[in-house]
Image (spheres, grey):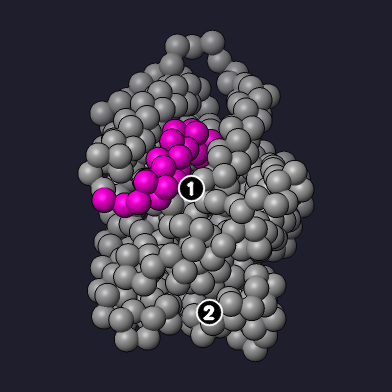
Amino acid sequence: MRLIGMSAGEAMQNRAARDVAGSLLLQITGRLLQIGLAILLARLLPLKEFGLFTLVMSWVLVLVVPSMLGTRQFVQREIAVAKARKQWPRVKGLIRWSTVTVLLVSFLISTAAVCWVFFRTSAHYSDKFTFIIGFLLLPLLALLRLWQAQLRGWGAIIAGQIPEIIIQRLLFAVFLLAGAALFASVEWSAVAALMMQGAAITVALLVTAFLKFRYLRIPSAASPEFQIRKWIRLSSRFTLLAALSVLSSQVGILIVGAMLGKADTGLFSVAVKGADLLTVAFLAATTALGPRMAAFYSENRHGKLQLMLSRAYRIVALLTFPVFLAFVFGGAFFLKIFGSSFEAALPALIILSFGKFFSVLSGPNGTMLNMAGQERVTVTAVAVSVILTAVASVFLIPLIGINGAAIASALGVVTWNLMLVFFCYTRLGIWTPVLGISLVKNRFPDFVD
């Protein structure tokens, strides 16, 4: 309760303490499953097939962004605000409009991507088929993420994370292990792994549909209210932001795949997955507290908001620091789990870890700006970061291989965090970094640290 800046009554009433603790547990479990899946895939697939699987999934993650039209963050924010104001017709309209729109757009983009691969690319037939299977997963993944965002916006924070983070990954692991046991003598391919991934996503989507039926019970019989033009205009900002954010995280893998080939893509992807472990506590806190940021800011409870952020992300930084030290001084032991060939990714893992830890120390600056309606500012900062990362990658990768991609990625992360911290402070008066809270605490009479 003290961590999130609330009294006992407030924490019990809003279930915020449970949501933060539950999100942290889910993120830790989910990342362990993610690492376990990466190890399993690296052991089952030849290095080039592992790299191909990683490359296809990177493209899927990039294309799922325009497939969702920015509705993931937009719907979560708008449902949280509309629920706080008891605007039930608006909530109904948001849920129906976003579901139909995402389903239609994701199907069109998936179809266009499949046609492009089949008719326009010169890749080997087996590689073409692998990309086609991956692109067919787009509608399923887009709908899964949208429905989870709807649940989180309604306040079902834990239920809005379980299907993708736990169920989908756990089922994928079960399918891989079952396949390995049944077909031990058969050489695995990226196509087989993607088909199992699709089966796991389908089951997770069905579970999410059940959770929506259970939790999203709007207490009003009024007809849904639609503000389609306004929603498209606002969500378009999130579309660009989400696209840039995904590009920022995937551009290194995509450029390595284009310049160095499938084997180096597999090595670099393992370093990326390892460094991502540093964001487990950060993502848990941000997922749970994001709707509260929107509610507090819209209600002008800025002192309460600053107190919540300051306390929560100090703890996040303390939880992350041991993981950072483990990768800097013992990253080789982590990489050996994937296989002896993956030890070559150690310098890249250390470089990426520095970038991720800097991001944790900078706090939830992007989420805070988005929840306060400042998406344009976030788009600008992330766009600068993506351009910088891409340009640096093109120059550095030919010189020092995947280590150049790691330096470029870390440089991009540092740049966008510095810009967003500045914008949060100057535009909102909110200080998101873990250090330096004394700069702003005197602004809020209700800030008692």
Q: Main secondary structure of the magenta part?
A: helix
Name the residue: 26% across, 48% down.
Answer: 121
Disc 1: which residue: 294
Q: Name the N-terminal-most of marks 2 and 1.
A: 1
163 falls in the magenta region: no
Q: Quadrant of the C terminus?
A: bottom right
- Up-down relation of residue 26 to residue 262 (above or below): above
**Nearer-the-camera pick, 305 or 240:** 240
- Per the image, label 1 sits on a secondary structure element best described as helix
Disc 2: which residue: 345
Mark number for residue 20?
A: none
Which segment did they paint magenta? 122-146
Residue 410, image quadrant: bottom left
| Label 1 crowd (10 A; few <14 / some 14-19 / many >=20) | many
As drawn, the residue found furthest toward the bottom would be 329
Q: Amino acid at mark 2?
A: Ala
Q: Is residue 411 left or right of residue 392?
A: right
Q: Quadrant of the N terminus?
A: bottom right
**Nearer-the-camera pick, 267 or 120:** 120
- Per the image, label 2 sits on a secondary structure element best described as helix
Q: Amino acid at mark 1?
A: Ala
Q: Percent position (x, y) of residue 154?
A: 57, 34
**Nearer-the-camera pick, 373 or 275:** 275
Disc 2/disc 1 C-alpha distance (Å): 40 Å
